[in-house]
Image (cartoon, rainbow, N blue to C red):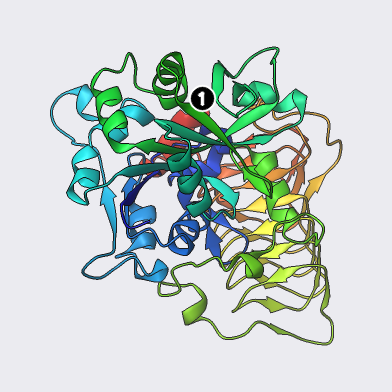
Amino acid sequence: MRRTVAFLLAGGMGSRLNILGWLRAKPAVPFGGNYRIIDFTLSNVMHSKINAVGILTQYRPHSLMHHIGDGSAWDLTGRTRTAAILPPSTGMDDQDWYRGTADAVAQNMNFALHYQAEQILVLSGDHIYKMDYTPMVEFHKQKKACATIAMMRVPWEETRHFGVGIVDGVDRIIDWEEKPGKARNNLASMGVYVFDADFLKEALENRSGHDFGKNIIRDAIANGGVYAFHFQGYWADVGTLHSYWQTNMDILNPESGLHLHQWKVRTNLEESGIIGDRPPFRTNKTAVIRNSLISNGCSIEGTVINSILSPGVRVEKHACVRDSILMQDCVVERGASLFDVIADKRSHVGAHGRVGVGDPHKPNCRFPDHLFTGLTIIGKDVVLPETIQLGRNTIVAPQVRPEDLVDRDYPEGSTLVKVSSDSIGSAVQREVK
């Protein structure tokens, strides 16, 4: 793998994650208690012994850049190893920003050429899976392919969300359907590509558009030499609120195939507020914990069932958290109950509040395409007052405080926004509108 260089696409906005993606890039969203989504692809790069990875950022990159640091958490630092942050050229013209995945790689081909790359891996930073890329690169070499795509079988009803390949008897891709309404095959792209470096350089220079799936891959198939590498194992795209919640819940299911410790996923333990700064979690005799992942620094006096708690979460006496994901430093006060909730960092639920109750089938009124499966989403730095009642499929925008609320009881499908005139509150309101 010495002559293989990776590009990791990490600039996505993650609009379908709604408020979880408003203040950070999608790959930087916390996942599985101690991790961020991008940790999985970075760990795959590390375990595949790839020495150089260029991380292509764009949308709200600060938390992502802070998390990656110098790459040492994944052994990607030193004289011959690097994890380089590659933002777009931010000049005076709109075209200086990345206009698509292919354009992002095209603007940074010199990075790969500097390391004398013979093969170039193009990876997505927002998927949950474990993969050693070495067999795929060897397959690519054996086939003398110009491009190889990692693919897996998906349920037929899911094919409309993917690029779908039509293959011949030797796994050569002979046709391509991008998010088809009625697919001819259910062999879907995982967003993992291997390219011959010379081919990719020429293809990017002569591309008809700015996206890999729609342009580079389709054009390459027309010229032959594109192959499918079959992947068997756990893989999840956490691009929607429900898939994000479900994939976290899969951590708690030993039959799911998602095994954090077996996968040896790495994260940046030196990042402020993460494990290295936290004591072991503590409980007392009133605590009840069942089938849950509890991180360092948590304090549990109430009940936690089938839930994932990031570092520093506090669940007070007689409080109940069920089927929920609570990110760093959340607080659930005495007597409060949370059902099917995703709560971003430092959110605070007041005493005897009830969050996630009522009819799960009534979608969110403002974002019906984002939230319709019965979850309730609480944004970063939210403080909810005592005895608050929130129905399912409700969204609470970041930094909402008790003074922003006109009531204590909100029905299913509500959206609560900050009404103060500060800049963040105004930005949130513009997003909601």
Query: Percent position (x, y) of residue 272?
Result: 41, 72
Q: Is residue 8 visible?
A: yes
Left or right, 391 with respect to 325, comes to: right
339 to 173, vertically: above or below = below
Q: Residue at x 56, y 86 (%)?
A: 279
Left or right, 296 with respect to 429, comes to: right
> What's the residue type where badge 1 is placed?
Lys
**Which sits in the foreground, 62 or 54?**
54
242 to 168, vertically: above or below = below
Left or right, 302 with respect to 16, comes to: right
Q: Residue at x 50, y 67 (%)?
A: 266
Q: Badge 1 is on which residue?
A: 433
Q: Quadrant of residue 271?
A: bottom left
Query: Percent position (x, y) of residue 351?
Result: 73, 64
Q: Is residue 125 visible?
A: no
Left or right, 417 with respect to 193, comes to: right
Query: Percent position (x, y) of residue 179?
Result: 60, 19
